[in-house]
Image (cartoon, helix red, strand yellow):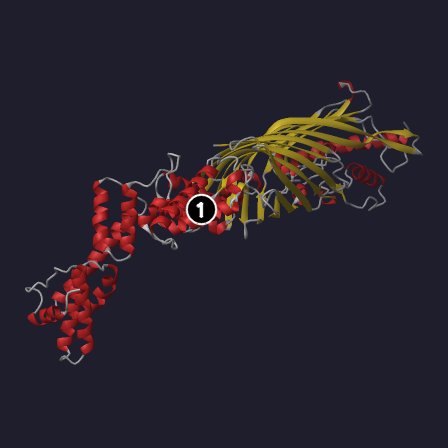
């Protein structure tokens, strides 16, 4: 390690210390801690049927999952119905700055993929039509994300002066679960409206530990920041469904998603004294608005498409810098609102009395990663350039993700239906199983 | 904060939407309700629901898709035909059975497996009735409302859809009588059904209709007795068409016209003609009917007596 790079590393440490000292006085928001740099949402509609249709379900919404997909669709149900979904997710996180090869003058970064798995009951609902109204109570896992990774320390690209990131180990478990009720009614034979509302609970547990050297031992810890907290807020979905003909359906939804305030603990360890600072971090789960159209060409063949605007920019609302705070500003971190596009088709046939549905679809998820959008060299101050270079390296623009979806459904009887679905995409794969019981 | 304000707003919106009177049933809801009504012997209601289903989805279909992944066997013509037959509308029932038969879907049923045999029975019943008629008289088009042709309906093996009972026939006949203006006859039939403690869809509505007409009759007579002859004409004229078999209506209507005729100085002969027409209807309704001499003047009774017996 050169003297210069040692100084750089020291500066990173000093920056962290400054954060720790000023933290109590700073308005808090989602942070630029790298644990959240690759955080991804998955707002696909619940239910294996919807999943297999590429999530295009706003205009269909004709089963118990409608409470989340489009509450207005609940009016289609004429009998009580119970729905349950279990989901397995595999997240693959590529850490670009895992390590490096070469010399400070000429090097290559080494990336590494880290995978995490989550299996959980992700949706359950019961629907009861009562007169002209249809009611539903549901539990929906809006977010369930896990990430674990570590780095061995790497050069900060494209600096060639030997400056390195400290090695880190990190883990994040985050979930947002909605508990709600929904009500829907027909305004006319063709038009239905519905609303669902309830309480959202966020549970977050994260720990990012920064080490002085690549020895993951308590004695080498420089700092860590942790969140182990739960928070609550209200959510609300509203939807409308218009069926101008028996075969054509058009739907629209608005989903106001919750915001949470969690307590983050930052600890900086030094030889002369440790400092611990607690602060509130706000998470604004992006709201969305969408429209969908479905066309039932025959009783056996259905097509559906959705377009959904996701207001990802809320992620940087009340955003604060927790690192390099004197050299980067909240405004340097941005994420754009994005359009999701979903499309799917379902073909149904009967084998004896068992209905078999084959489904396929795809959806495009826009880049939802927070990126550093500031000018790296906005001054001649080498420390500032270094800090901004650091931020640009960690918070890079992502890419839109295409998810391929497929699935099968079996209508075993008038009362029981089971569905299975899978999606494959860069960064996240999912397998979904669900069943519906009708009474 | 927005959600906290939006939630009550949306709830208020939902509650404010005028749901009353909205006929919003999907075709499968109407079909289901029609089947239920049929199983409860509510034939008029069943026919109405099934007609509503047919208007939305006219094609019969085995494994018809309703919502989500829910499928039903949808044979609305078969069940409407049964309902219509129970209502005495044999001609319409026959058309429905034949429509269902032509569609052929009923014979592909996976769930409603008794529908096919049931339709065959109905059709065979039609053939046997037609054959019997051929033996006795030339075949003619079946009447659309022939209560005496209810024999066209073959007794179904399913106990849920039983053959029409005496009460069913009585009720159907009473409804038809009321529709044709045979108010007294209908009233007697409804009273008879009430004594048998039988209720039917729309029963109370029919009773209320009769009661409303009786109120109008009393109002018209009261107008006549108080010397308001034109008002009596205005009140009794519409009710006379709905109470053809009530002689008092026509008698007081005729008396009112006659009174107006005499008050006109016997110039307005059309009033006398209308009086005679009304008196003629009164005599037709009850050949033994006589005007009450304590209520009607001798001159008017003379006009009445001048009308020949039917």
- B291 or A228: which is nearer to us? B291
Please give the residue where the numbered disc 1 appears in the rendered image: B97
Residue at screen point 45% across, 40% down: B120
Q: Quadrant of the C terminus of chain B?
A: bottom left
Task: Please say if A429 is above or below B273.
Answer: above
Residue A238 percent location from the top left of the image: 54, 45
Residue A136 percent location from the top left of the image: 49, 37
Residue at screen point 55% across, 52% down: A245
- A43 or B51: which is nearer to us? B51
Q: Is residue B83 left or right of residue A47?
A: left
Quadrant for residue B300, please give it: bottom left
Residue A17 percent location from the top left of the image: 74, 31
The number of callouts visible is 1
Mark yes or no: residue A321 visible.
yes
- A136 or B197: which is nearer to us? B197
Which class describes the residues within 10 Å of circle 1: few (<14), some (14-19), or many (20+)?
A: many
Task: Please say if A267 is above or below A26.
Answer: above
Q: Quadrant of the N terminus of chain B?
A: top right
- A228 or B119: which is nearer to us? B119
């Amino acid at each position: 390690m050169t003297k210069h790079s040692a100084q750089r590393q020291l500066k990173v440490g000093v920056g962290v210390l400054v954060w720790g000292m000023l933290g109590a006085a700073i308005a808090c928001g989602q942070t630029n801690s790298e644990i959240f740099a690759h955080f991804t949402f998955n707002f696909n509609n619940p239910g294996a049927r919807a999943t297999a249709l590429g999530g295009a379900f706003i205009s269909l919404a004709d089963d118990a999952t409608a409470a989340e997909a489009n509450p207005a669709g609940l009016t289609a149900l004429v009998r009580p119905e119970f729905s349950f979904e279990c989901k397995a997710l595999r997240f693959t996180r590529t850490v670009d700055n895992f390590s490096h090869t070469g010399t400070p003058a000429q090097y290559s970064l080494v990336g590494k993929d880290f995978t995490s798995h989550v299996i959980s009951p992700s949706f359950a609902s019961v629907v009861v039509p009562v007169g002209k109204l249809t009611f539903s109570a549901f539990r929906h896992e809006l977010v369930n994300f896990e990430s674990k990774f570590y780095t061995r320390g790497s050069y900060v690209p494209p600096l060639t002066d030997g400056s390195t990131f400290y090695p880190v180990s990190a883990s994040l478990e985050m979930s947002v679960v909605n508990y709600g009720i929904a009500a829907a009614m027909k305004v006319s034979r063709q038009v239905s409206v519905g609303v669902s509302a309830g309480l959202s609970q966020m549970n977050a547990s994260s720990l990012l530990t920064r080490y002085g050297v690549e020895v993951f031992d308590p004695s080498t810890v420089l700092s860590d920041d942790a969140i182990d907290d739960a928070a609550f807020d209200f959510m609300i979905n509203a939807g409308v469904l218009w069926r101008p003909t028996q075969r054509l359906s058009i739907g629209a939804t608005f989903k106001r998603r919750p915001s949470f305030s969690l307590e983050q603990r930052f600890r900086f360890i030094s030889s002369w004294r440790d400092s611990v600072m607690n602060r509130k971090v706000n998470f604004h789960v992006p709201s969305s608005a969408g429209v969908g159209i479905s066309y039932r060409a025959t009783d056996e063949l259905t097509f559906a498409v959705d377009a959904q605007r996701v207001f990802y920019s809320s992620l940087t609302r009340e955003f604060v810098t927790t690192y390099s705070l004197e050299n980067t500003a909240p405004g340097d971190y941005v994420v754009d609102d994005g359009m999701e596009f979903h499309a799917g088709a379902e073909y149904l046939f009967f084998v004896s009395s068992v209905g078999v549905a084959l489904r396929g679809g795809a959806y495009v998820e826009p880049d939802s990663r927070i990126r550093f959008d500031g000018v790296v060299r906005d001054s001649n101050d080498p420390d500032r350039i270094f800090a901004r270079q650091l931020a640009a390296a960690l918070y890079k623009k992502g890419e839109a993700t295409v998810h391929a979806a497929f699935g099968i459904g079996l209508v075993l009887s008038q009362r029981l239906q089971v569905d299975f679905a899978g999606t494959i995409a860069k960064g996240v794969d999912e397998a979904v199983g669900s069943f519906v019981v009708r009474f | 904060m927005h959600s906290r304000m939006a939630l009550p707003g949306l709830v208020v919106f939902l509650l404010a939407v005028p749901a009353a009177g909205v006929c919003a049933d999907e075709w499968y809801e109407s079909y289901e309700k029609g089947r239920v009504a049929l199983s409860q012997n509510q034939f008029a209601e069943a026919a109405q629901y099934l007609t509503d289903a047919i208007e939305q989805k006219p094609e019969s279909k085995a494994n018809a898709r309703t919502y989500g992944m829910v499928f039903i066997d949808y044979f609305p013509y078969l069940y409407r035909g049964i309902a219509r037959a129970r209502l005495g509308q044999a001609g319409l029932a026959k058309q429905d059975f034949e429509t269902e038969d032509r569609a052929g879907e009923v014979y592909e049923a996976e769930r409603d497996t008794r529908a096919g045999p049931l339709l065959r029975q109905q059709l065979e019943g039609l053939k046997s009735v037609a054959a019997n008629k051929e033996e006795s008289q030339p075949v003619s088009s079946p009447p659309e409302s022939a209560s005496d042709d209810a024999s066209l309906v073959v007794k179904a093996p399913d106990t849920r859809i039983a053959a029409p009972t005496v009460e069913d026939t009585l009720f159907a006949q009473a409804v038809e009588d009321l529709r044709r203006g045979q108010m007294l006859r209908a009233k007697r039939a409804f009273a008879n059904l009430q004594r048998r403690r039988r209720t039917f869809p729309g029963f109370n509505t029919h009773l209320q209709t009769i009661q409303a007409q009786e109120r109008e009759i009393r109002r018209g007579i009261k107008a006549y007795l108080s010397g308001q002859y034109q008002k009596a004409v205005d009140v009794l004229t519409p009710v006379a068409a709905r109470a053809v078999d009530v002689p008092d209506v026509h008698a007081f209507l005729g008396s009112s016209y006659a009174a107006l005729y005499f008050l006109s100085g016997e110039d307005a002969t059309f009033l006398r003609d209308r009086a005679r027409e009304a008196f003629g209807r009164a005599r037709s309704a009850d050949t033994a009917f006589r005007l009450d001499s304590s209520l009607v003047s001798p001159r008017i009774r003379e006009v009445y007596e001048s009308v020949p017996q039917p």
